[in-house]
Amino acid sequence: MRIDLHTHVLPPSWPDMARRSGYGGWVRLARDPAHPACGRMVIDGRAFREVGEETWNPARRLDDCDRFGVTMQVLSTVPVMFAYWAKPEHALDLARMLNDHVAGVVRESPARFAGLGTLPLQSPDLAARELERCVRQLGLRGAQIGSHVNGKNLDDPALFPVFETAQALDAAIFVHPWDMLAKERMERYWLPWLVGMPCETALAICSVVFGGVLERLPRLRLGFAHGGGAFPALFGRVQRGFEARPDLCAVANPHPPRRYLDRLFMDSLVHHPAALRLLLDLVGAERVALGSDYPFPLGEARPGEMIDAMPDLSVAQRERMLCGTAREFLNLAAAVPAREEPGRATSGQP
């Protein structure tokens, strides 16, 4: 059994948000009728990412799952769709459309898909209400959020009610890096994705640890993409900094970072066996879940391939990473339903 915690999905189409809102900056999906399996993500006429039908076609996704032995994918939007920069009411409008779509895909194949919503975090009140709708009405397992909100780190007091709502709903929050820091210094060599994303994730983890978010919400389940980014490699320095300069590090939370290691869920997408061993040494297989970043090229082409290839992992560690940790993080039922036969889903429309 394999549950892929980290995959991204888009609807086959959505309304023109520039026309709907009266201003630009929105993503749209441009699809060429002559090449129906290909598309481009476009902002204000500028194409910035090529995508294939696996991004919006559930049947194609399920074919890939069957080919790679994936029992279930956890669906979340592409982070560029967060739209934290937009007016709150318009970001909510888009979030509701995206969340309704994800819920529709899950309803068509509930044995193969679970879903995470997206939230208009620039308005914590609207975000909390949309999270409640996602969980109670749409049946989603929680939400995917960005590593910051317009420059506000995740310990910002304005965001605390959203985390508080997540704990009350028993909803999972999966943190994905976006809009990377120092991007003006990383214009070449794809560095925002290679360097900026890991740093963003480490910053997000340190924010919720030092800022006391985990301390104040003991039942909150937070997960972090890309194996926690740079955090596992930086943990010794982070812990030492707390010990050496509590006057600077312990200003919002008196407890050391090591206290929270068993609270941090992370995916397995670290691209090197030594990095995965470091992650396992730090948090254990009980907090590491299979994640592939499907369908994007920086992900793991065959989900779980590295876990399968590491001879020093025990059977228990493999099973925990391949399915057990995701089930706990998402609060899934004790058993994931058996696979459906091919021909289960077609359009993905709600």
Image (cartoon, rainbow, N blue to C red):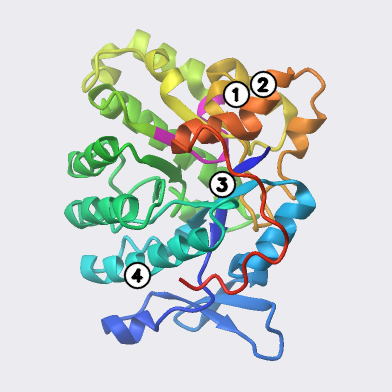
Residue 193's tag is none
Q: Amino acid at mark 2?
A: Gln
Q: Provide the residue designation for mark 1.
A: 279
The residue lying toward the viewer, choosing from 28 and 210, is 28
Q: How far, Cα to Cα, is label 4 from label 1? A: 35 Å
Query: Distance of mark 2 from mark 1, alpha carbons?
Result: 12 Å
SS label for mark 4: helix
Residue 121, visible in the rendered structure: no
Left or right: residue 239 versus residue 342 is left
Gap in angstroms between the C-alphas marked 1 and 3: 17 Å
- Most extreme residue toward the bottom is 34
- Please tell me whether mark 2 or mark 1 is closer to you in this view: 2
The three-letter amino acid code for the residue at tag 4 is: Leu
Determine whether the residue tagged by mark 3 lies in a helix, strand or loop.
strand
Q: Closest to the observer: 134 or 267? A: 134
Q: Is 294 within the magenta?
A: no
Q: Is residue 113 left or right of residue 158?
A: right
Q: Is residue 229 magenta?
A: yes
Residue 291 in the image, given as x and y percentages of width and height: 61, 42
Q: CA distance from mark 3 to mark 4?
A: 21 Å
Q: Which residue is mark 2?
A: 317
* Dot 2 alpha-carbon crowd within 10 angstroms: few under 14, some 14 to 19, many 20 or more: some
The residue that mark 4 highlights is 94
Residue under label 3: 6
Q: Is residue 24 left or right of residue 63?
A: left
Q: Which numbered disc flags the more N-terminal residue, 2 or 1?
A: 1
Q: Dot 1: within a 10 Å radius of its alpha carbon, few (fewer than 14), some, or many (20 or more) residues?
A: many
| Cα–Cα gap, marks 3 and 2 | 19 Å
